[in-house]
Structures are given as structure tokens and as C-alpha cells.
Amino acid sequence: MNFSTCNKTLTLILMLSSIATVTSMALSSDPVPAPEQSGPIAIVGATIHPVDRAPIEDGIIIFDRGQITHVGFKIQIPAGCEVIDASGKHVYPGLIASATSLGLIEISSIQATNDQREAGNLNPNARAVSSVNPDSEHIPVARANGIALAATRPSGGLISGQSALLRLDGWSWEDLAVTQNLGVEIQWPSMEGRRRFFEDEDAHAEGHHDHAGTPTVEPRAEDNPRDASRRARVDEIRDLFVQAKIYCKSRPAGWKVSDGNAPDLLLEGLRAAVDRTCPVFIHAEGAREIRAAVEWALGAELRPVIVGGRDAPQVASFLAERNVPVIYGPVHRLPAKRDAAYDEPFTAPAALARAGVEFCIGSFDTSNVRNLPYHAATAAAYGLGADKALEAITLAPARIFGVADRYGSLTRGKSATMIITNGDPLEIPTQVEAMWIDGRRVDLTSRHTKLRDKYAEKIRRQAERRAF
Amino acid sequence: MTRGIHLFALFVATCWTVQDLPAQTEPRKGIERRVPEVHAIIGAAVITEPGEIIQSATILIEDGIITDVGTDVQIPAHARVWDRSDHVITAGFIDMDYRVEIKTPEENSQAGRNWNSKVHPEHDTAEGFVIDSDTASRFRKAGFTNVLASPEQGIFSGSVIFTRLIGGSDRRALIEDDVAISGGLQAGRGWGGGGYPSSRMGAIALFRQTLIDANWYREAWNSYRAHPDHLQRPESNISLEALFPVIDRKVPLALRTRDVLEMLAIDKALEEFQVDTWYYGNGQEYMWLDEVASIGSPIILPVNFPETPTVDGASGDAGVTLGTLEKWAHAPENPERLRRAGVPFTLTTRGLDSPSSFAGNVRNAIERGLPSDFALAAVTTEPARLLGVEDRFGRVAVGKTAMLAVFDGSPFEKGKNCVEVWIDGIRHQNRPDPDSDIRGTWQLTVNQPDKPFEINVVLSGSEKSPRLTVNFNDETIQRSRFNRQGNEIGITLPGEPFGDDGFVRFGGTIGSDGQIRGTVTSPSLIAAPFVAIRTGDVPENQQEAATDEQDDDAEASDEPPRAAWRGGGGRRGVRPGAPGGRGNRAAAFSGRRGGGGKGNSISADKFEGFIDREIARPMGAFGSVSQPFSPPSVLITDATIWTCGPGGILEQADLLVMAGKVVEVGKNLTATKGTHVIDGSGLHVTPGLIDPHSHTAIRGGVNEGTQSVTAEVRIGDSVDSEDINIYRQLAGGVTAAQLLHGSANPIGGQSAIVKWRWGFTPEQMKIKNAPPMIKFALGENVKRSSRSSSSGARYPQSRMGVEQIIRDAFHAANQYREMWNRWDSADRSTMLPPRRDLELDTLVEILDGTRLVHCHSYRQDEILMLIRVAEDFDFTIGTFQHILEGYKVAPEMARHGVSGSTFSDWWAYKFEVYDAIPYNGALMRKAGVNVSFNSDSSELARRLNLEAAKAVKYGDVPPAEALKFVTLNPAYQLRLDDRIGSLEPGKDGDFVIWSGDPLSGYTMCLQTWIDGQRFFDRNEDRMMRERDKERRESLISIILDSQLSGAREPKSEESGEEGSR
């Protein structure tokens, strides 16, 4: 990358800091958060992909105080502006990961490092945002491949808690939070019994990644759990929302702790959802579950968003008609049913697009959120097309999260959250070479690059020794 | 025995004293009966053996033996005569698969027995054998007189015994013991708890080792007996001794199977042994029919055909797979398909809720093509033949034991029942003699002296519980009640019409003259006598809604009777309208089809032609009904060809594959006649992708984690060629894979190296002569899996212990090798023959360098440790699997010469992978290590090409080299790089056609070829989806058609218990 910048000091600082990381491994591998944008920056020469309109070749994008001030070509560059020559490169909005548990899960098999799951079934008051570890090693790893924003979600139970939208750089969770209460996570009970599960679905479904002491007994056909118990679980969700509605009416928002009269924390947790200031994210996979969940949520005057949505293509016209968005994913998964077409998950986003469903694509992952663009690429290959695939990980999630006025596209007035790449970010070999979040130039090193650098040195020295 | 039979029969005919039931040792109670048991059963149609029928025959039984059969039989004066006109008599049925629960052998009873609690061939099933009276009675009601009983559990379970169904703890139930030794692949819980083995492959390994042990045990003892002074006495083991009759082929092994692949796997495992086998079948034999037929063993087939699947919107019929529908549609053809393939079989009730559903299900099979003679043979003559007791059982003939089943129609005929069986000449009644039919109009006269009166009574409706209508003075009396107990009847009427206050109660007895006499009581009457005389049949206008039974007759009359019995059909000596009122129903064969158990409530003509359909392999969606497209040669022109060989990437090049091999890669190749030419312009071609770490297509457990060392276990024993993920991976360009044992123990099992030949058998999927491999594992899994064990902590618990376990195993292998070397030159009188140990054999192969280790590993310490251990034992590790910290010790790996097969970018799913980095592959490569990427996941395996692209992204590996991470490099790790992994002349014609650059996320796999045969084609895939949709819809239509056409749910006719499962 050939950055010609007016600010040589900055370049020097960057160089120094990269030397420092190689030599002092004792430091935390988590990079230092970036400082506020100190002056206007213009990126010139690159192909700009604004997402909300056609790409601009040899374009110019200028941003100041964290906001994009100009996008186009042949724009007058104001004096005193740092100019970055990115000829031959590409500029894209920072990618938005819509389904992660970033900051909540560090090492999934070690409970002590996990904070995404609270005890019990009903936890609408549990807030993901205040448990996000800003120093999680996963954050820089995701960022290094262009992920600028990520929704982090609690999981488990029936109502798992409140998710948050994060920008992936900052000192504290308050710095990271774009939206503290993004919505309430609901896990819709499955209508498929165990027995059917084993008949249809893969006995060898993937998951744990190295077959440690996997159950060695043959899959057993267990009895179908009674439909009644599923209904009871649905009723648990339903009842809590009915209570919340009454509660929120009788006890207006804006009360203070000093007022005395302690609140019901569970029902308070649903206030934003009941007031429709935030959506409910309903995790549902089967067609029947999706239909049932949507009908319930709309009846309860909520704003449902379907998350997962394996069978969403089967009910696509229904979702389009009911204006319910879908966070689809992962694209890289096995078809759930034995008879399904092998490419069923690959073609699902295209099917949603054709039916006019508002949707975005998620990777449903935490340690490999960086692979989000490749989920989109597979959807692109199987009918969605490259443009819509890109939109599905930028502007589309921004819309669903209600932050499209600030994020998701390279548009004048929006946040300067963008990446410079040497190619299409949906292609695996493409490198993300620089990233700005809200105009702040963030560090793209990570635990991974640091370990690489350390041991590349060992290999280099060994080779040297052998050469002599 | 056979030779003696005629003499024996003659002897019986002239002598009273011979009893087939042996004398009992129990002291007699009371007065001994000495009257000879002589019975003459007359009037019945006797099926002496399938296909042979004698009308109106007499069977003479003397002391349990049939002494005469025919139409011209002299009935001795002292014989008791049984008129069985309207009945059909066959030999009593024999069920060859009755399972008995055997208690877990006591811990302290292990002395002198086999070490493994699932190996108890010495178990004597006859000891304490009891069939409870209820069970025996249920069997008898279905026509059975004998069962073969075997233990339900264990790998070697114990003796199979031949018994009579006399019920209770009668000591004389046993006919023959040690007919066979039974076994099965019992893993996990059950007999002997949850110890070794816990997997199907572990069970096969133990099965194999046990047979080896039995052979060794005999040899060792022979040796010891020959030289008792010089040799050490071998261990005593009655379990192994019990297997001598099997290895001497005196009795067969009777083996339980849960699916066909298991049957094929056992058969394969038995290749090295000379033993005879019977298989207890599983109902799926038709799915891999040719292979089952080639086994050549008799099969004891269940008839528990699947229930009709539920198809409706509310319960989501989308969840019912095509495979489920097809199994439902085709399973009843299983017996007929086996017959056509020439497989000998018998039929069993096993798997049915009750023997009462047996007839209905056999009828189902008959309706679907099985000749009824074969069905009958499968429960009479065939079992007798297999058991070697044809001289006494299976036929109704002179000299045979009197084992008879008496039916009120044809056996297996709808609505007909077995009314009694005869076991050793003793009659076992299956139901009480029927009450007489009293339906009709009756004139009831009360002979009250002062005011006699008459009432008209009509008994209509069903025979069993007729409906009462009472007319008095031309008015119908409401609220009347009729009841009956045998010949006692009662009628209760309100007193009002008779000018009485309360109720009038009649109680009477049906007399031998057909009149009913009794007394009537009411508030004003005290035991006034009455008499009822039958005046006629029920008037037509009073006949009510038909009962099931009547309905059957009505339907039967619509169609000409079909011959249910060859040579006997329709000519059975049944006289319509015979006395007793039951004759009507027995009048004709029901022409009605269908209506068996719940499993088949649908008329058989809906399945017309199904029997001749090809069964897809594997059954269900995307199964193939034909061989894959295999042109004599294939030429792809103008494509971008990634050779993965020295040629690199060739633009606008051609690839010629002929007879399954790559012939040439180059420009302007010409096609010969008959060549399948593919225009490759704009397309890319690569070698078939190779997944060096897969757990796809393994059935019955990936781990045998119950012991620290399980080198004897073979994944090849449990390859699942029916796994849909095979097809899905073909659709991602994968052609070959190493199926690895899991990572639960330091030394795991042996790999299977396969090509994804979808539609073929497990054996056909395996790559012939592939070098042997084995799985090792280090680190967290090995430690962690032991902790979950209920039986205390299994060694090792730390990385320290892992090293020691491995070292110890190799020391043992060394000793073992030396022992065999000594044996080769030893004086036989000075040394016992060594025991062949499959575990140590395998470890010796590793030491010899003929078997390569693939070791699951993460951390640099353990990687280095294993390298040093191998160096101490003077062999080289083949490949480290996962090896996520390989980049930290890459130079050491390179020096040792070990390869690395890693994940492209997985990390942080557990602590030992917190330092995993996506640059690992590129860094190891840089240090000179052969590197591959693998999936370890059925999902990831679908896009290995994109995994390869990550080597470009993380570490700048050139694209052509990156693709080798999933082609040539894994081929080398499997030591198959001379055959697969690159497109070079002479190599296997395994290739993939891509829509574009294989490293691009926008690219799709279009076709996948193995050995010049096309196993995936995106266009064909579309066609299969349509084909499957059609098949599915047509089967669903059959179900719904019958359910919605107003057809009532079939009622079960046999004791209300009919229905499978």
C-alpha cells in the first residue's frame, strides 16, 4: 500500500508502534484503541463502493470529525487535508456482523470465560452490553478482516436478554456501544420433536470441532416431547409480554431509583420492546415456528425480526407481506433435513431477495466473525449476486438495526466507518489494509498477527542457521 | 437321527409306552394317568407341507406322534375324535427369534470366564429358561408351537435353544439346546454396563479378537497337553471353550443385526474365519439386496413393517423424508425380494407388539408378492431344515411330532384365527368353544297360570353381543337389556307394559333342543316359568349396520375368490352354511387385499408394480437407481486446468480421462469416438479434493474411548455408505477422504480411506490397497474424556500421562514382536503358541513403519513430545492433525519429516487452541512441512476449496500451491500421491469442474468425477430433486387417498392386537 500522507509524524508513529509489537510480546496482544480523528482525510484514487449507489472508479472520499463530508470524483480537496493515495485499491463501508457474541465469549469450552447465557428461562433484563469485554482477543481478529460493527447477542432460555450493537474499537463497553439496547432476544420453542430430529437431521451434525469423546452410543429415537410442553414454553413468553404491557402502561418510563417503589426488573427489561422503540429478535428456524412467532409478535404489537430463519424461504411471501425482516444465517451450514437440496442454505438469501423480504446475512459465530463476507459470497454465487450480497453485510443490517442514518454505506453525512482493501472483500484472498471507525484509524493487528510475527522469526532464524 | 425315524414311527404305532415328552424327574402327584393319548382329528383340510393339501383328512396322533395322515385312516376305537370340519391344519409354526433377557453376569462370576462382560458364549440359555404362560399363549394363538430362544444382549450372548411353547417353568419345554451360539454388535450399555466396547466398530473388534482367542485357546491347550512338563498352563476360560463348536462349524453363529450395513460389516469381519452363520434380520435387507444375497447365509426376517407415516400440514409433513416413505412403501416386499434373490429365510414375530400381529403382516407380504407357500414354509419347513430337525418337525406327516396349528380358515387369511395348536399331541385351546348363535326372532311365552302372556323378542346385530328388541302387544318396549354368559341368558324389561311396578327379569338356559327355558321374576311374579322358541331369522328390515365381519363377507362376494394356496386355493373342504352359524363367514377366501396391521392399512393394488422397482442406493432422496454416468473416455476442452502437478495451472487446456485414468493434460487433445466431450471454456478443472480428516459416514460411534489404547478398532468396520453428507460433499468437489477415529483416547482406531462413491457399498467406497493409517490423540480431549467416565478416572489425566501411555504401548508392542520372532524359531515343546493380539499387531505395524500415525494435537509441547517418542522407537509420525501450534515447532516438524493437516482458521473453541492462528498453514509450509487443510466437519468439507483460499489470504501462499493443501498434499499424507491429488497421466480420473476460479467465493462446483465416473452433476441434481419430489408426492397421495376416500380405519380382527410396532 502506498499511502502518501501529509502527516509524516503519524506514519512514523505507526511504524514505531508496529516495531514495538514485534519486540515486546509481553504486552497484551490487544491493540491500543485509536484516537479521535484529528483532521480531515481524503482517500483518493480508489474505487469507492458506497453500496447505496454504483461504485465510483478513481473516486475521492473525504471525511472529517468522524463524518463523511464528500463522496464522488473530481472533488476539490480542502487545504490541510491528509491525502491517502489508494490507487488500485477499493473503499467499502465497514462490514456489519449481525449475529455474534463478541465480547461475551472468549473460549467457548471454558465456562469461566463465557457471559452470554444467564440462568433461567426469562432474562429480558439481562444486558449484553455491560458484560462486553473490550479487551477480548476476538474483537481485533474480527476487525482485521473489515468487520467494523457487530451485534452481540445473549443466548439460551426463552428470553435471553438484550443484545447490543458495538463498534469494534474503544476503551470501555460504553465506548464500544453504538446501541446499548438493540433489542430483546427471544428463542422460539421448536415444534420439531426429538424423534423427528433424528430421522431428518443429521446424526453427525457438525459442531464441536474435533470429536472429543463424542457420544459413542447410537443416536436414539427419543419420544416426542409433548406438544403441550412446547405450548407451555410459548405461553411463558406470551405471558411475560402481556404483563409487561400492563406494567409499562401503569408505571410510566422515566422513574428514578430515588422515587422508591422498586420496579419489576424483568418487565422493565421489556419496556423498549413493548414501546416499539426496539425490535424483538426472534430466533426461529422452521417454517411453522417462523409463522407462529411472527403472528404472535405482530398480535402483541411488537416489532419482530426473525433470526436464523433456516426455512424463511418457504414462508418468504408471508414475511414480505408482513414486513418482517430476517437476519439469515449462517449460510455455511448443512441443510437441516436429510432430503433438502445440498445448496438450500446457500440459495436461501437469493430466495428472500426475490420475494422482497428485508434481510441481512449473519455468520452466527464469534471466533470467526471474520468469515462473514464469505457467507455473503456463497449466497452471491448461489443466486443473490455480488451487489446484494455486499449490501447484506453492510447497509441491510444497518437498516434492520435502525442505524442506517449513520452506518452501512459511504454516504455524505454518515459516519466515516470504512475499509480500504486490495480487492473484493467477499473474495477470501483479499486483504483489508486499513480501517476507520467513526473517522478513527484503527489498528488491524491482532493476537494472530503478533503470534505470526513471533514465530515467523523463529522459522527465519532456523532457516538462516541451516543456510550456514 | 434321520435314519432312525421310520423305525421309530413304526415302533410308536404299535406301542403305548413311548412318550415324546421325556419322563419327568419330579415326583408324581396324585394318581398317574395311564390311558394312552390317541387322537383323531377329522374333517379338516390338512396342509401337510407347503403346497401339499389333503381335503377332509384325518390325522391320527398317538402319544404325541403323528401315526397316520390321509383320507383313508382307520380310527382306533380308543381314539378321541375331534371334528375339525371347516378348518385348515398346518404344521405348528416355529419362530426362530425369541429373545430372552439375561441378567448381567455377576462381577464375581467372572472367574474362569472371559474378561469382557459382553462375551459370554458359555451362557446356557436353557438354564432357568421360562416363557411365561401368557407369552406362550399369545404365541400359540398365532399358530406357533415352538420358538428358538436366545439371549437379547452381549456380543457373544450364549446358546440358542429350541423349545416347545408349553409355558411356565416346565422342565420339558426344551427340545434341543446348543442349536447355535448367538451374538450381535452390542455396544455401550446393556450387558456388562458401559465399558468396552462403546461403539459399533469396537464391538466388531472385540468380536474378531474373541474368535481369534478361541482358536488360540484351543491351540494353546493342545500344546500344553502335549507338553505339560515344559509348558506353563494357559489360562482357563470356559467362554472361549464354549466357542469351540462354532469354530469347528458344528453349530452356526446366529447374529443379530440392526441394519443391513451392520450385516455386511459382520460378514466382512468373518471373512478370515471359517464359521457358519445365521442372521437375525432387520427388515432392510432389500435395500442392499445383492450384497445380502452374496453373504449366502439364511436370514430370520422380522415382519414389523413400518407404520404409515403421518402426512399432514399441521404436523409438518415436510419432515417426513422420502426414505421414510419409501421404507414404508417397500418394506413389505422385503421377504419377496429376498426370495427372488434366492436368499433362504424364515419369518419371525420379533419386533411386533405381539405375535397376534404376525398373520396380518405376513398377509401384507403375501399381498405384495410373496407366495403364500413360501410364507408358510418360512415358519414350518424352513426353520426345521435350518435346525436340522426336519425328521421330527415342520410337516404334518407320519412319524413327525404332533405339532399342529388349526385355523378356522387359511393361515394368514384375513379374519381367520388359529383356534388351537397341538404340541406333542396335546391340545392347547386358543379360545373357548364359541357360544351358539342365538340371533333371530323368538316367541317368549310366560306360563303364568292365571294370565299367560307372550312377547316377541328379536336378537339382531352382532353374534357376540346381539341387540335386543322386544315387542309386546305390537309395541316396542323401550329400555330393555339383554345379557348372556355362555348358555345362560337374561332379559330385563320395565314392568309397566305388563302392568307391573318395577322391572321384569327373565333368566333362562339355552337347551340342547335350542329352546330357552327359565323363570321370570318381577315385583308381582315369583319365578314364573317361561319358554322361548326361535321362530325365524331376523327380518331384513331389522338387520342393522353391518359389523366388520359381515362386511368382509359382503366384499368377498364381489370378487372371485383368489387362490391363497397353490394347489389348495378355493378347493378347501369348507361347507358353506355349516351348522353352528359360523360357516357363513368361513365360506370363501376373502378377496379383499390389504388391511393388515396398522403398518398397512392400504390396499395392495396401490402398490402395483412396486416389487419390480429398483430400490435407490442408498434409499431415499438423491439415491441413485443406476450406475453413475461412466463414458469410456471424457475430454474437457479449453478449460483452466489446475493440475496440482509440475504443470501448474494451464490456461485453455484440455484434460483427457480414459478408462478411469488421466491420459493427458495439454492443448488440442483429440477425442476418439465415443468420448464424452465437455466444453470447458470459462470453466476451471481441478483434481478431486481430498479431505484428510473426516468423520462423515461413520455409523455407530466415532470413538472407542473406553480404553486408552484401542488400536484394534477399525473405522472401516462401520463405514456408513448411506450418509447423505457423502453426496453433499461430492457437491463441494470432494472425492476422497480419510475417515478417522475420534480423539477420545491417546491411541485410537484405524482409519478408513475412501472415495465418495455415492450409491455404492462401504467396501466399494474404500480405496483398494490404501496404506494403513491410525489415529492418535493428545491434549485436552484425551484428558477430558476420561473425566466424564462414570467408572472413575481413566489414565491419563495429564499430558504427562499421555506420553507414558504411548511409550508403554510401544514397549508392549516391541515385546510382542520379539515373542513372535522367538516363536518362529522356537522348539514347540518349550513355548506356548503366542496369542495373536489385534491391538499389538497394529502397534507393531507402526513400529515397522507400515502404518502411519495421524495424531490429533494442538500444543507445541505435545507435538514435540510425540516426535521424540517416535524417534526413540525409531519410526516417523505420518501427520499431525489439527496441529494448530505447528507454526511454533515447524522447523522441528520438518526435521522429523512429519506432515501437518490443519484447520485454516479455527481457534478459541477451547483453551489449547487459544494460540491457533490462520497463518499456521503458510508458516509450516515455509518451514518445509507438507501441509494440508481438512474439515473435521461434514459442513466445512463442502467448501475445502475456499479453505485453501485462506492459505493465500493468510501467508501469501501462491494460489496453485494453496490448492495443493486440499489435493496433492493430503494425497501425500495418505501416501496415495502416486494415484490421486493431481491431474497427471496415469493418475486416477478424479476431477472437479468449477464454474470459475476454485479459490473464489463466487464459484460453484458443477461436476465431480471419480475414476472417470460422474458422481455429481449440478444439472442432474436438479433432475433428481424433481424425481424425488414426484416420488414423494406419489407416495403421499397413496396414503392420503386411502385416508380421505372415506375408508374407515381398519379394525384389527385378531384379538384387537394386530399392528406392527
Image: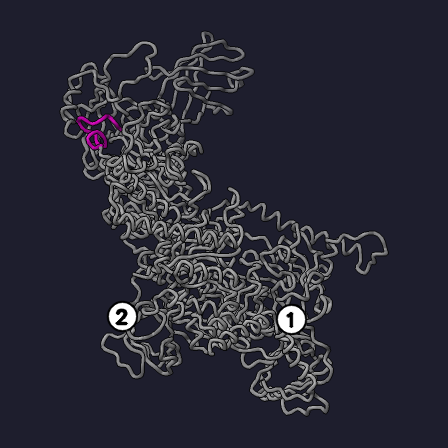
Q: Quadrant of residue B33?
A: top left
Chain of the residue under the numbered disc 1 shown in the image = A
Compared to residue A428, the image places residue B260 above or below, namely above
Chain of the residue under the numbered disc 2 shown in the image = B
Q: Position of residue A392 (x, y in %)?
A: 58, 72
Q: Position of residue B212 (x, y in %)?
A: 31, 44
Between B280 and B315, the residue placed more toward the observer is: B280
Which region shows up in magenta?
Answer: B389-404
Quote the CA–CA distance across marks 2 and 1.
53 Å
Residue B251 circle label? none
- Is residue B946 in view from this perspective? no
- Is residue B667 in view from this perspective? yes
Q: Of helix, strand and loop, which mostly describes the magenta segment?
A: loop
Label 2 amino acid? Answer: Pro
Q: Residue at x 53, y 11 (%)?
A: B524
Specify the quadrant that holds the N terminus of chain B: top left
